[in-house]
Image (cartoon, helix red, strand yellow):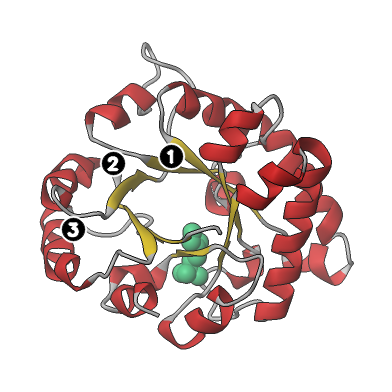
Amino acid sequence: MRKKIIIGNWKMNYTITEAEDFVSSIKDKINVDFVDVVICPNFVSLYNISNILEGTNIKLGAQNVSWEDKGAYTGETSAPMLVSSFVDYCIIGHSERRTIFNETDEIVNKKAKKLLENNIKPIICVGETLEERESNKMYDVISNELSNSIDGISKEDMERNILIAYEPIWAIGTGKTASAEDANKMCSFIRSKIEEKYGSKIAQSIRILYGGSVKPTNAKEILDMEDIDGALVGGASLKNDFVAIVNY
Ligand code: 13P
């Protein structure tokens, strides 16, 4: 039985003080017995938020990482630096990073491996554009993104450490949600691809999330789906709505 997981991706929002105030205001309202909960603030707030989350079951995640350990890479943040901020999870390959910052599947793959080396769980995002969906190319797109991003990752890591998030690009920040059935169909397709490569035990244990305009009003319908093991929440994770989603 896969435990559901709700992850808040704050994107580039909240200063350190705003982040501290918000987390302090919600942390006691989150019931974490039946779901895992992860909050992904901006890099500069990570360490302070780790202090506020101490003693709770809410985990900390980052939104990006470098594939290098250290050195002359101005502006980058390494996996060991994330470890020193008590980060357990890290989002990689978000469509905003792929489209605005030109991240390729190869880069996502290198980042995933670097995170695993440092015992941080990668949340690998995949998703199709509206044009790709309308021209029925979405299964090919997702299949390619997935297989390139997980290339060379061991069975053990797939079973225990990797999470996949299906985020259709047209549903991100638009208020348009994929129907629960469509989202489930794609998550089930992703699981079948993992089964082809790694076998059914691993396919049945890996957690596959949906992201894209998840809100309190649609969370239950989405999270009740058989192949959807959690939600990657953007805008609604910046408000009290996040509490309502977690307690769905
Ligand atoms: P929204 O929930 O704001 O649509 O964002 C989804 C997302 O990109 C989460 O990573």
Q: Position of residue 55 (x, y in %)?
A: 13, 50
Q: What amino acid type is highlighted by mark number 3?
A: Ala
Measuring 23% from the left and 59% from the top, which residue is drawn there? 14
| Mark 2 or 3, nearer chain start | 3
Depth check: 186 or 77 in front? Answer: 186
Helix, strand or loop at disc 2? helix
Q: What amino acid type is highlighted by mark number 2?
A: Phe
Q: Mark 2 touching mark 3, by CB under 8 A? A: no
- C-alpha span from label 1 to label 3: 18 Å
Q: Is mark 2 within 8 Å of ligand 1?
A: no
Depth check: 40 or 135 in front? Answer: 40
- Which labelled disc corresponds to residue 43? 2
**Side of 87 where 136 appears, left or right:** right
Q: What amino acid type is highlighted by mark number 1?
A: Asn
Q: Is mark 3 within 8 Å of ligand 1?
A: no
Helix, strand or loop at disc 1? loop
Residue under pointer 3: 19
**Side of 47 where 40 appears, left or right:** right
